[in-house]
Amino acid sequence: MRMSQEMMDKTCRGFAEALAAREPVPGGGSASAFVGALGASLCGMVARYGATNPALADRADDLTRAFAQADELAQELVELVAEDVRAYGQVSAAYGIPRGDPARATAIQDALHVAAMPPYRIMDACGRALALLEDMADKGSRQLLSDVACGAVFCRSAMQGASLTLFANTTSMKDRARAEELETACDELLDMWLPRADALARRAADAARKRG
């Protein structure tokens, strides 16, 4: 628990250094969660500017709700940075059980399932952030379209990165029905959100270039 809290409290420099260290955590899952948090935070920034823009007064209530939701998603994703670390700890502990112990195999399989859940939750949160970013492309300030596009790119990257972490765990699961259920759910999120993220980034970038 203490290590997870320390992970959440690191500076940007500290987190980058922790990723570069010769240590198993943080790894791709935690990095994906952090990138997703950045995307959600950009969404919150765009919504905040819009909520206080007199020219957008007719949608101020929607924008106020949007930045509150974006803040919640950013916090959820920051917490998933640490949750991914904790989940890996269970996998590491399970593999540390002596090979002769009959409980080892079950412990490993259970831990792999637990470790697959934070990446899935990262993907789900990024999908919700992308839905908000789509809304910001319609309702937010035209001056901030590039930030909307950046948020979409970050959330897309985080979602794809988290999927790789999920697959790394499900590949080692012996219960293939359980593994395939997770993989199918993961694929459904990818199929739903990656094209929408790409379209949103292109749309926002094209509009920003036309405006310029």
Image (cartoon, rainbow, N blue to C red):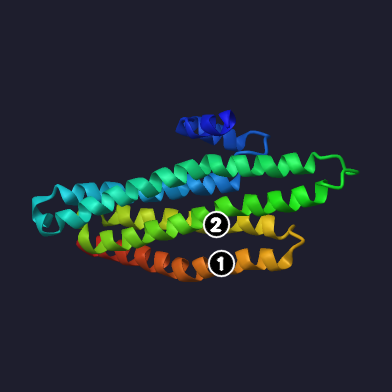
Can I make out residue 94 in this image? yes
Name the amino acid type tagged 1.
Ala
Tell me the element at label 2.
helix
Q: Is residue 211 left or right of residue 57?
A: right
Callout 2 environment at 10 Å: few (<14), some (14 to 19), or many (20+)? Answer: many
Q: Earlier in the sequence, mark 1 or mark 2?
A: 2
Foreground residue among 92 and 197: 92
Please identify the quadrant where the N terminus is shown.
Answer: top right
Q: Residue at point 52% right, 70% down?
A: 188
- Where residue 32 sits in the image (x, y, percent)? 52, 49
Mark 1 touching mark 2, by CB under 8 A?
yes
Across and down, in percent, residue 57 comes to 10, 55
Q: Considering only vertical position in the picture, is 185 above or below 147? A: below
Q: Amino acid at mark 2?
A: Tyr
For residue 212, say whether it is visible: no
**Res. 185 mark:** 1
Q: Is residue 58 left or right of residue 133?
A: left
View extreme (right): residue: 100
Question: At numbered mark 1, what does the secondary structure look like: helix, strand or loop?
Answer: helix
Q: Which residue is mark 2?
A: 120
